Image: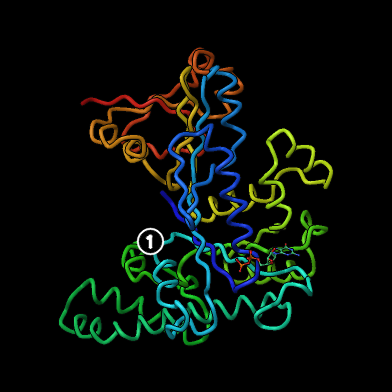
Amino acid sequence: GFKCGIVGLPNVGKSTLFNALTQTAAAQAANYPFCTIEPNVGDVAVPDERLEKLAAIARSAQIIPTRLTFVDIAGLVRGASKGEGLGNQFLANIRECDAIAHVVRCFEDSDITHVEGKIDPIADIETIETELMLADLDSLEKRVVAIEKKARGGDKEAKEQLDLVTRALVLLREGKPARLVEVKPEERRAFDMLQLLTAKPVLYVCNVEEASADEGNAYSERVAGRAREEDAVAVVVSAKIESEIAVLPTEEQRDYLDAIGLAEPGLNRVIRAGYALLQLVTYFTVGPKEARAWTITRGTRGPQAAGVIHSDFEKGFIRAETVAYADYVALNGEAGAKEAGKFRLEGKDYVVADGDVLHFRFAN
Ligand code: GDP
């Protein structure tokens, strides 16, 4: 599955947020099978109201959402790149994640100590990002000599990598993250192999005080501005509110949200933003037994999409019977879609679209 690492300075609300995510997941665990929760790893359901609509049409007995994994990577501090604290361990944990959710303190509270002494989300972001950039610089500088040597010896892959490394080093030395390297599609694989921390997509999670949970505040505005400049995404959430919502029974959550004027839990925004950041899309399998959502990367073709369900589906892929989500709903299910000519047979080259309702045909 896809993993999103939660990072941030101490005392910004990471654990509060992570616990809210996993408590919600724990509450759902009774309904959804295969939900394992480790102390710092939580699998959360991706909220998607389309799934409920499909299940209602098909009268599915069970609804199974798709999931996204969050990892609480606590303790990233100034000096982590120099191995201070548990520095190296954190960096290794981040390396294993597909994206970074960077929690930033955007709330005032004189009772909660700020490690840097004052509330300044941009400075906090820079502190963390500096550590990640230093770690990337260090790792590239260690490798560049060997890559240069190989490239001079005529190794084609090394030449390609050297070019990327050189471009990444220029940016990193200017204090810019490696995700700003302009990577051509044909270079993508080599670039990913460099495993740079600052190449990972970033979602800033602005932890604001309760009163600003909906619209954010002046601090979160500044973070949003920064995100726009550097190809990142920002969402506003109140970790405190989320931790209160998470422990309520489902029926009471709605009333609580209404009372504070929120359309949905802020965590939903975080989960969806993480999902979008990873360029993930969802397809559905729908029947009387269950309506289920599955995650694929944007651009995935039929057989590989089928492979998410089972490797046999990929190996023996023949075709995907396909109905677009909008057609499925508008025509009241598969039979209606067939009558209206909206039931398609798609082959190996078909790029699965977000929302497709699929039925795979395969040979053993
Ligand atoms: P972490 O070190 O980043 O994991 O931070 P924690 O989640 O442990 O939070 C540190 C402290 O800040 C705890 O006492 C939390 O209760 C408090 N805290 C977290 N989020 C909020 C918030 O949105 N508002 C206020 N006032 N306090 C918060």
Q: Quadrant of ligand 1?
A: bottom right
* Residue 6 location (% of width, % of height): 54, 62
- Image quarter (top left, top right, bottom left or bottom right) of the C terminus: top left
Position of 115 with respect to 88 (left or right) is right
Q: Is residue 171 visible?
A: no
Give the residue type that dot 1 points to. Answer: Pro
- Which residue is disc 1 drawn over? 185
Q: Quadrant of residue 129?
A: bottom right
At 48% from the left and 56% from the top, the residue drawn is: 39
* Residue 285 location (% of width, % of height): 45, 28
Seen from the viewer's position, the closer of residues 164 and 287 is 287
Q: Quadrant of residue 250?
A: top right
* Residue 211 location (% of width, % of height): 83, 58
At 43% from the left and 86% from the top, the residue drawn is: 82
At 45% from the left and 82% from the top, the residue drawn is: 81
* Residue 199 location (% of width, % of height): 45, 69
Q: Quadrant of residue 249?
A: top right
Which secondary structure, mark 1?
Answer: helix
At 61% from the left and 61% from the top, the residue drawn is: 233
Vertical placement of 41 versus 286: above or below? Answer: below
Q: Residue furthest left?
A: 153
Seen from the viewer's position, the closer of residues 70 and 308 is 70
Seen from the viewer's position, the closer of residues 14 and 217 is 14
Visual colour scheme: rainbow
Vertical placement of 353 versus 228: above or below? Answer: above
Q: Is residue 232 visible?
A: yes
Position of 58 with respect to 260 (left or right) is left
The mark tally for this picture is 1
Vertical placement of 74 versus 235: above or below? Answer: below
Position of 15 with respect to 174 (left or right) is right
The answer to whether mark 1 is within 8 Å of ligand 1 is no
Vertical placement of 133 versus 104: above or below? Answer: below
